[in-house]
Amino acid sequence: MKKRPKAFAMDRRKFLASGGGGILAAAIPGAALASATGSSANSPVPLVTSMMANDSAAQNPGASANAAKPRKIPIGVFDPVYADLSMDAMLDTVVALGLEAMEIGTGGYPDNKHCPLDELVADPAKARAWQKKFTDRNLQVATLSCHGNPIHPDPKHAAKDADTFRKTVLLAEMLGVKVIVGFSGCPGGAPGDTQPNWITYRWPPEYAQAMDWQWKEKVVPYWKEAAKFAREHGVHRLALEMHPNFVVYNPRTLMRLREAVGEEIGANNDLSHLFWQGCDPVEVIHFLGKQGAIFHAHMKDTVFFPENMNKYGVLNFSFEANDLALASETFRAVGYGHSASLWKSVIKAYMDVGYQGILSIENEDPILPGPVGVERAAYVLKNVRNEILGA
């Protein structure tokens, strides 16, 4: 872990990170960073159990006493966080955490450290042997993920990512995996562009023209063909992560693509990207879930630093610990940006809409190293799930 910048040595944060401020640090988003950085990598999760002591009826006042018992949604992890581990070491680590499922990268930006895609697609016997490593440990391969940009204006880049998508579909067909996760991609803004052009605002008029060209000429045609290919191979759930710098970045753009292409298009509902856009997580889950449009869910948190957000706005995201002194927000492990009670309401919302996927921990926390962040997130998620289920 990188050393915390001296700019963080603020009196308020020092207090919240001290023994008397743990509960406040967990409850105040801007103080969550100090709460996390004030403890060692091996220390227990900061007092999340005190935040979980919420009465179930108070959390869900409209629930019927006779309602059917909610589904126990499996908790899993996205494997790039264990890129430095061998396949067997990774699986043993995941089992030791008490997790039940996995999301496995097959290529694209997160790469495919534990899935030799070309080799498995070429040999069904090897693919089955690969899957058996999971089933022997009672782990489900729930999703295959190829987060790339198949509509990149660089033809070589686009072709590589499109090929990875097609091979991922073929592997999913072999293994009986029903969900493929990825990005919508982003093209250039006009013919001849060499780099993607992410457009979110339709003025001045040339930006509206460029956005319309992107969707008509690049986005919708590619995804219609991709959805057709997936459908022909028994895959009907393409979970696109609503992510900045791609054309699908919020629920509205997701539904726009779904309406244009078909019901194979749905969400990888990664709330970490929606928090900073001002979305209410429970409202998003209800909105998309009632339309059957949530196929996958990344479990990742976002923390806000109000003193910077008030000055710089939300378009001031940082990824590195050394940059956080001036950041408006950054990613955190589940429970380190928003309270456990908020995450309890999130999990309850997924159960309420009948979500059939998994809760996949993705850790990109710049303060807690990858495996440590996974462990902390798993602790919070298992506890809130148990509370909801009455376990």
Image (tube, rainbow, N blue to C red):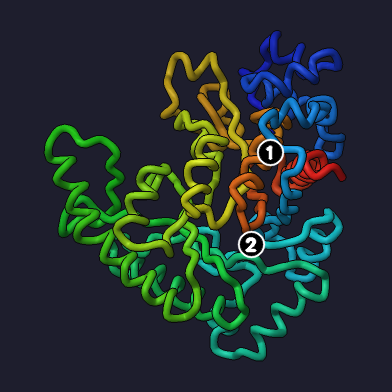
**At 59% across and 37% down in the image, what residue appears?**
331
Q: Please indicate whether residue 327 sits to the left or right of residue 252 in the image.
A: right
Observer able to see residue 110: yes
Between 235 and 324, the one lying in front of the other is 235
Between 61 and 245, the one lying in front of the other is 61
Between 359 and 67, the one lying in front of the other is 67
**At 66% across and 91% down in the image, what residue appears?**
125
Observer able to see residue 363: no
- Location of residue 297 with respect to 316 vertically, above or below: below
Q: Position of residue 232 (x, y in %)?
A: 42, 80
Q: Please indicate whether residue 185 sits to the left or right of residue 220 in the image.
A: right
Element under disc 1: loop
Q: Which mark is residue 103?
A: 2
> Tag 2: Cα neighbours inside 10 Å, few (<14), some, or many (≥20)?
many
Residue 6, image quadrant: top right
Element under disc 2: strand
Per the model, the C-alpha gap separating discs 1 and 2 is: 17 Å
Picture quarter with the N terminus: top right
Q: Please indicate whether residue 86 sits to the left or right of residue 124 in the image.
A: right
> Tag 1: Cα neighbours inside 10 Å, few (<14), some, or many (≥20)?
many
- Location of residue 374 with respect to 184 vertically, above or below: above
Q: Position of residue 342 (x, y in %)?
A: 67, 31
The kind of residue tagged 1 is: Val
* Figure disc tally: 2
The kind of residue tagged 2 is: Glu
Picture quarter with the C terminus: top right
Q: Position of residue 229 (x, y in %)?
A: 39, 77
Residue that badge 1 annotates? 334
Q: Which mark is residue 97?
A: none
Q: Earlier in the sequence, mark 1 or mark 2?
A: 2
